Every structure is written in C-alpha cells, then in structure tokens.
Amino acid sequence: MKPLGEEAASLLLKGYACSESVLLAFSKHYGIKSELIPRIATAFGGGFGRRGLVCGCVIGALMTIGLKFGRTDTSQSNAEACSAVS
C-alpha cells in the first residue's frame, strides 16, 4: 500500500474532495469498510460545504478517528480515547 498521504493525494486527483480522500485512504489503511464511506464526508468538502472553514483534510482525519476509536452508545467512555488521538 502507498503511504497514506500519497493514497489520499491519488484519490484527490481522481476527483474526490479532500475530506473524502482522507477518509477513504485512512479507512482502507485501518480495514474499515462501510457503504457510507465516502458519502458521509461529501458535504465537508471545501471547508464545511464550500465555505472555506475547517479544511476537509482535517474533517476526514477526525471522521477516521471516530470510526476507529468512537463509541457506539452513551455507556462507553471512548470519547476520551478520541480526544487523546486527535
């Protein structure tokens, strides 16, 4: 597998937004599969819906952290684990 940055750049050149590219590359790296990837990241392209705010690369990375370390219900305390990684 390519280094993650190169993988994300390759996806960007194929037409994916930054948020989609980063989420796809990291999800592949961690073996996370979902039909929602990259759909869930689409609206974040261009800095929150093309508003030029937080970069889509950051959003894609944070989404990946949530997928890898996030919790599935309120009885779990994984929110701290996500904060520690990000």
Image (cartoon, rainbow, N blue to C red):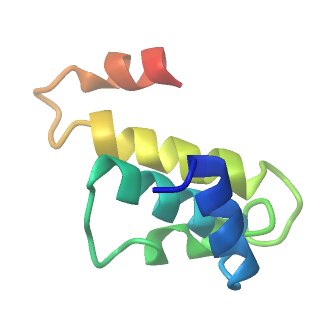
Number of numbered discs present? Answer: 0
Q: Is residue 22 above or below residue 86?
A: below
- Which quadrant, please, contains the N terminus? bottom left
Residue at (10% x, 27% y) in the render: 75
Residue at (67% x, 70% y) in the render: 10
Q: Position of residue 25 (x, y in %)?
A: 50, 59
Residue 51 relative to residue 48: left or right? right
Residue 38 relative to residue 33: left or right? right
Q: Quadrant of residue 14?
A: bottom right
Residue at (71% x, 57% y) in the render: 56
Residue 43 relative to residue 29: left or right? right
Q: Position of residue 60 (x, y in %)?
A: 57, 53
Q: Position of residue 18 (x, y in %)?
A: 70, 64
- Comparing 28 with 23, the one in front is 28
- Comparing 65 with 74, the one in front is 65
Q: Which residue occupies the extreme front position in the image?
A: 1
Q: Which residue occupies the extreme right position in the image?
A: 52
Residue 55 relative to residue 19: left or right? right
Q: Quadrant of residue 81?
A: top left
Q: Is residue 69 above or below residue 41?
A: above
Q: Position of residue 2 (x, y in %)?
A: 54, 55
Q: Which residue occupies the extreme bottom position in the image?
A: 15
